[in-house]
Image (cartoon, helix red, strand yellow):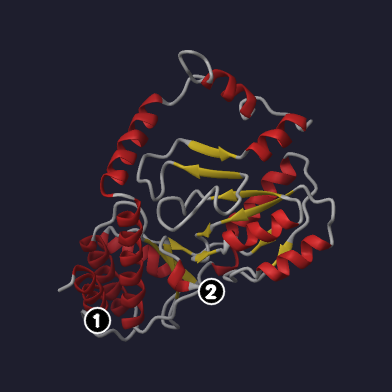
Amino acid sequence: MPLAGFFSDRWRQLAEAYGLTVHTIDEEWGTKLDPGKVADALAGYPGVKGILLTHSETSTGVIQPVEHLARVARSAGALVIVDVVSSLGAVPFAFDEWGIDVAIGGSQKALSASPGIAFAAISDRAREAAASSTNPRFYFDWSIYRRFAELPDPENPWTPAISVMQGLSAALDLYFQDGVDAALARHRMLSRAVKEGARALGLDLFGDGLEDNWTVTAIRAPESADADTISEAMRRDFGCVIAPGQGPLKGKVFRIGHFGYFSELDIVRGLAALEMTLEKLGHPVKRGAGVAAAETVFLEASGS
């Protein structure tokens, strides 16, 4: 499995906790994975059964090329298992067209429901592999869910989190009210606004393939202030929450999320708080530059 961030490494930890033998392709954090390099690595492990991928690596602000990575994995005969927790609903994803075998999502990110539900899409190929697997499982046994789903009156085999499921249902109604294309366009617009706003403040962005990531923007801290200090000051002084860096990026980058039901004014307020925080911490700022850059993106998107 390719490792290029915090959540891909969590995949490794989960797999090893379940007794799997894991071969890793270690890349620098912030790297957009090269499918050719992954294909070469898979060739060295002819018996590999699956590849674990993270679509949106929020620790680095990188969207990985899952469509192309899945193609080389299937060519090697491997199942393709993808973490789409933070990408589903925010960036393009096509389970069937891309040849994905298992995609695991969550309720709390771009779909804007409360946390508490994980869900999976499962291909026929994955179901066949699960049927012959001897790995221990109980609550996560897909065959039990399928059996209960096929009852004349379908039900959940365990007591579900009803209130969270109702919240997710309402969130999905809102999401599909405007349609998938509109939702993706909104995420792309908010992403552009944050990135242009940060650049207008003289800040450098972090990670490969920046224009593809409509979920989170990772921003390098300026020399005048530690990234953790910036995020702490924004929370303390303005009640504005951004995310500090993780792992080797701690103190070096901070991250601004723009997936889910953020509006244009949420982004404007956040950039205004960042401007004032940076100025307080000694970073030279042209007041209003970040906000103006974001407003330009919004007005262009509206046709004004």
Please report contact status of discs 2 and 1: CB closer than 8 Å, yes or no: no
- The answer to which of 123 and 41 lies nearer the viewer is 123
For label 2, the crowd category at 10 Å Cα-Cα, with few meaning under 14, some 14 to 19 and many 20 or more, is some
Query: What residue did someone put label 1 on?
Result: 289
Q: Which part of the image, by quadrant, shows the C terminus?
A: bottom left
Quarter location, residue 263: bottom left
Query: Measuring 47% from the left and 52% from the top, which residue is drawn there?
Result: 86
The residue under label 2 is: 208
Q: In this image, 233 relative to 136: left or right? A: left
Going 52% across and 61% down the picture, which residue do you hit?
59
Nearest the viewer among 47 and 27 is: 47
Could you say where residue 298 lies in the image, as x and y percent from the top left?
Answer: 22, 70
When the figure is inspected, residue 205 is found, relative to residue 26, above or below; the finding is below
Q: Residue at x 46, y 23 (%)?
A: 160
Farthest-out residue, left: 304
Estimate the x, y position of residue 246 in percent, counting from the top left.
54, 62
Mark in the foreground, 2 or 1: 2
Name which residue type carries label 2: Asp
Q: Is residue 36 above or below residue 7?
A: below
Query: Of the residues shown, which amino acid type is indicated by label 1?
Result: Ala
Mark-to-mark CA distance, 2 and 1? 25 Å
